[in-house]
Image (cartoon, coloured by chain):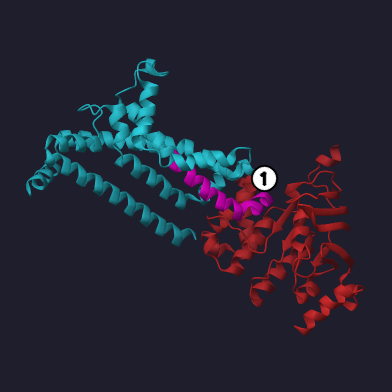
Chain colours: A cyan, B red
Amino acid sequence: MDGPFATAFSLIASGDPALMQIIGLSLRVTLSAVVIACAVGLPLGAALALARFPGRGAVIVVFNALMGLPPVVAGLIVYLMLSRSGPLGSLALLFTPTAMVIAQTLLILPIVVSLTRSVVEDLWAEYREQLLSLGAGRLRAVPTLLWDGRVSLLTGVLAGFGRASAEVGAVLIVGGNIAGHTRTMTTAITLETARGNLGLAVALGIILMALTLTLNAAAWGAGQWARGRLG
Amino acid sequence: MKAARDLSASVLPLSLEGVGYAVGGKPLLSDITLRIEAGQRLVVMGANGAGKSLFLRLCHGLIDPTTGRRRWASGEARAEAQAMVFQRPVLLRRSVAANIDYPLTLKGLPRTARHETVAHTLDRFGLNALAGRPARLLSGGEQQRLALARAWAMRPQVLFLDEPSSALDPSATRIIEEMVAQFSDEGITIVMTTHDLGQARRLGEQVAFLHRGRLIEHRSAAEFFAGPQTPEARAFLAGDLIW
């Protein structure tokens, strides 16, 4: 039974180039998706918290529901958009890392939007009168509230990263799991397990878990530090 | 037109003309007529729920009257000429100095002028030692001191204070009262609510007494405390003595 683990550790210890390539691509795709989702989701969530318009409740419910969007469905949607006969087929993005970034962004965005909305809404209830009194209108309050909610928001961003790095359905559909091109840690684990090549699968599993643990430890530490430091 | 643009011109007096505020048809303030003159210290008194806080928010422009008129001498309500200090100060999650700087940035002051004002404000209110500390971690008294300093740094003509010391111990209360008195000496118009009779006596020049959303007495503090005219105000003062 120690076969796969022994292989896994020797792969990790030797810095196997194929393994490194897979890890590199996974991180590149997921981090890009997180950055894009934050760039869009933070302001969007804050706007949703402060704006009052008809149908606002429906928009909030939809974003909340989309947090549970199954990755395979997200993958399917992006596939339909990017496939040759789809509306964006001419861009020839299907089975490229870019398509994977798009699919993962779709998965992370609802998390970032919903969490930002909730954090900013609570802060706004507390800050509203004071900020208006100091001369900040709703629009100007957005960056202030995002900055003051930074510790709580970090948790949401991390949850987004966790979801994207762990999912397999979306990247498999739109990436195609092409070796050396669109193979990520999760798709590789799926494939290698099916093939009975458990050493590589276990190695990737260990790395994925270690990555998640490290990130969460860092976020928790940052949160503790910030609470003590910022109140 | 030109006079209205002049930023040093007085925005006062503020006149409320038959002002009322209702929520869902329920009147919370009714038919308030009052003039707040430049340079005076007006203390707003009344029992809990009399409408003191609403009255301040209405004067400051955080809420708008549903009936009647609120008129500033300058014509428009100039936000930068007013400041408000709340019962529980809301400080931003950043340093003491950055909290003072924040409204100055909103005002569009150039960087050097901001630095100068922040340094001067810290210095004047003895906050230099706390300048780099996170504002949220200060004690309650220090937080309120910072909230007052921040308001002062905005150079308001009128300062609204909503029970600024009701959550503070006596020594912190005294510091706050001294600050308010100094602001008044500098010519800043003070409008504050309090249910602390001692504080009202120490700081009030004028007293406005609210009862169930109506202004039932508005006189000089000396006259008011010597003998209130309405039975409600008499009961209020007597009740406080018994307690």
Residue B42 horizontal/vertical position (percent): 82, 64
Q: Going 67% across and 51% down the picture, which residue do you hit?
A: A134
Q: Nearer the viewer, residue A89 or B7?
A: A89
Task: Tell me if residue A168 is in the magenta stretch.
Answer: no
Residue A217 horizontal/vertical position (percent): 32, 54
**Residue A135 can be seen in this image:** yes
Quarter-of-image position of residue A108: top left
- Image side of residue B196 versus residue B217, left or right: left
Residue A182 horizontal/vertical position (percent): 26, 28
What is the three-letter code of the residue carrying label 1?
Answer: Lys
Q: Is residue B220 above or below residue B119?
A: below
Q: Nearer the viewer, residue A109 or A58?
A: A58
Q: Which residue is mark 1?
A: B107
Q: Main secondary structure of the magenta part?
A: helix
Residue B214 horizontal/vertical position (percent): 85, 62
Query: Pointer 1 indicates a residue of which chain?
Result: B
- Image side of residue A12 versus residue A146, left or right: left
Quarter-of-image position of residue B39: bottom right
- Image side of residue B135 versus residue B41, left or right: left
Q: Secondary structure at mark 1?
A: helix
**The magenta stretch spans which residues?**
A110-137
Q: Going 61% across and 69% down the picture, which residue do you hit?
A: B141
- Image side of residue A171 versus residue B21, left or right: left
Q: Nearer the viewer, residue B218 or B99?
A: B218
